[in-house]
Image (cartoon, coloured by chain):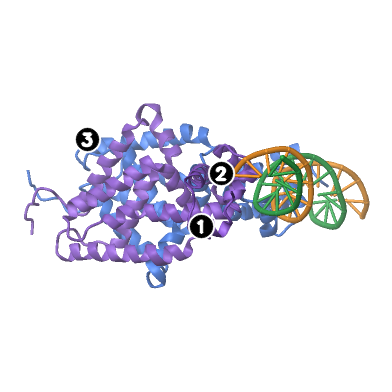
Chain colours: A purple, B blue, C orange, D green
DNA sequence: GTCTATAATATGATAGAC
DNA sequence: GTCTATCATATTATAGAC
């Protein structure tokens, strides 16, 4: 009943897809915590609840698994930026971008850490994707921000560094979660920290860009 | 001529210290790029320019090396925050804190990545230090910020999240350097990117906290 | 498709000569 | 102190039975 491997890439049964999902779920858990080299197939198999040879039947190598995960995560990871709308209102666009990124950090911390591990270790597997699709998307959105600034809708600022700062501040709550919890202590480290972070970041970025929901006082 | 190991921790010759430095320098290079589990003693020995047994004569285990590095880095890593002065002017204190952190990201990216790797992978070796000395220092400085806000010198904001956002935005340029370079492209990714980042972050934080060097217009 | 067994290699650490 | 040789184990991956 085994399909030849070539065919499996074309059409897979539901069971096969479910197994592959199960494996990738486990792989995400392990890779996100230990990085590529630190993760072992043994661990992944154990988390996935199957034997190592069985796992390797679905993904021939550790690298195949990692590549599949990285590709998928990189794609969905950029969705919030794709939604960034040139026609929208700068205040609500920037605010909801921050909110979506923070929600992803809260709801998908493993994906964030997988990505962070990869970048941190020199991005050996995704350099092309960073320089290609990622750069293209950021270039496009940077142009939107620049146009807003030119039209006086937000303060003049470097749009690339604005995007970097939104990425870093929001992903911090996933990637450095252990440190955030340690510093905040048990009392403040509950789920409410995401609401606190959202409030703070909204204030920081909206004021930092001279955006105000009430029309600003004329001062010049 | 070999001193017993017990004595070496008490007093070391210059040659021994130099060797240990040489090893830690190599270890920093390798650990910062691959994390603890991903790094190999072989690699470290090669970078240090000595044989593996020779290296292991100075540091009996891989973990000893890692611990020595982490302890040292964590200590110097907090120096900029220690300099944060309650008696100083909020504008110049926050501005120079950002600048110092950004300079560290530029001049000591490996130290930043070593730390990031450790936190990202759950901080198995330094949880105590995070919950102890680090938390204590942050608590102290958060109180300073809170006092400034109470006195109306800066906008009211959550001081912990302010500190987190300064950490994350500045360290981003070390930890995610590969991504930053990929997005900026060859033209903008030169050394000048740190100046651009400094300008942007200064604007973001000083405006974001309603701090202005010129006295603000009365508007209420 | 899944298993047990195992090959092939990588890796942390040590033994013992010099 | 430094070396060569090597042990013990961990790890990726495969072979072959079922």
Q: Residue furthest bottom?
A: B187
Disc 3 is placed on an element classified as: helix
Chain under callout 1: A
| Residue farthest to the top, as pictured | A187
Query: Alpha-carbon distance for marks 3 and 2?
Result: 36 Å
Q: Would residue B145 appear left or right of A6 to someone viewing this image? A: left
For marks 3 and 2, give the one nearer the viewer: 2
Say few, some or many: other residues with alpha carbon within 10 Å of mark 1 (under 14 / 14 to 19 / 20 or more).
few
Q: Where does the image place residue A185, in percent across and percent down from the top left?
A: 40, 30
The percent coordinates of residue A91 (x first, y second) are: 18, 52
Residue at numbered disc 3: B150
Mark 3, Cα crowd under 10 Å, few <14 / some 14-19 / many 20+, is few
Q: Nearer the viewer, residue A52 or B146?
A: A52
| Residue linked to disc 2 | B70
Label 1 sits on residue: A9
Q: Place residue A78 in its image quadrant.
A: bottom left
Q: Nearer the viewer, residue B111 or A16?
A: A16
Query: Which residue sits at x=23%, y=52%?
Result: A94
Q: CA distance from mark 3 to mark 1?
A: 62 Å
Residue A207 on image: x %, y %: 20, 49
Distance between mark 1 and mark 2 Cα atoms: 45 Å
Subunit of mark 3? B
x 38%, y 62%: residue: A134
SS at badge 1: helix
């Amino acid at each position: 009943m085994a399909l030849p491997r070539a065919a499996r890439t074309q059409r897979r049964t539901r069971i096969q897809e479910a197994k592959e999902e199960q494996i990738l779920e486990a792989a995400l858990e392990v890779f996100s915590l230990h990085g590529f080299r630190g993760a072992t197939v043994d661990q992944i198999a154990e988390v996935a609840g199957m034997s190592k040879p069985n796992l390797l039947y679905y993904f021939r190598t550790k690298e195949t698994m990692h590549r599949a995960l990285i590709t998928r995560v990189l794609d969905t990871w950029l969705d919030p930026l794709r939604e960034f709308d040139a026609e929208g209102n700068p205040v609500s666009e920037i605010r909801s971008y921050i909110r979506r990124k923070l929600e992803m950090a809260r709801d998908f911390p493993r994906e964030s850490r997988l990505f962070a591990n990869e970048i941190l270790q020199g991005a050996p597997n995704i350099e092309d994707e960073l320089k290609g699709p990622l750069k293209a998307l950021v270039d496009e959105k940077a142009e939107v921000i620049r146009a807003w600034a030119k039209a006086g809708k937000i303060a003049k600022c470097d749009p690339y560094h604005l995007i970097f700062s939104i990425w870093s501040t929001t992903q911090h709550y996933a990637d450095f979660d252990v440190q955030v919890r340690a510093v905040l202590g048990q009392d403040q480290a509950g789920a409410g920290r995401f609401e606190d972070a959202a409030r703070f970041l909204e204030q920081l970025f909206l004021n930092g860009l001279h955006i105000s929901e009430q029309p600003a006082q004329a001062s010049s």
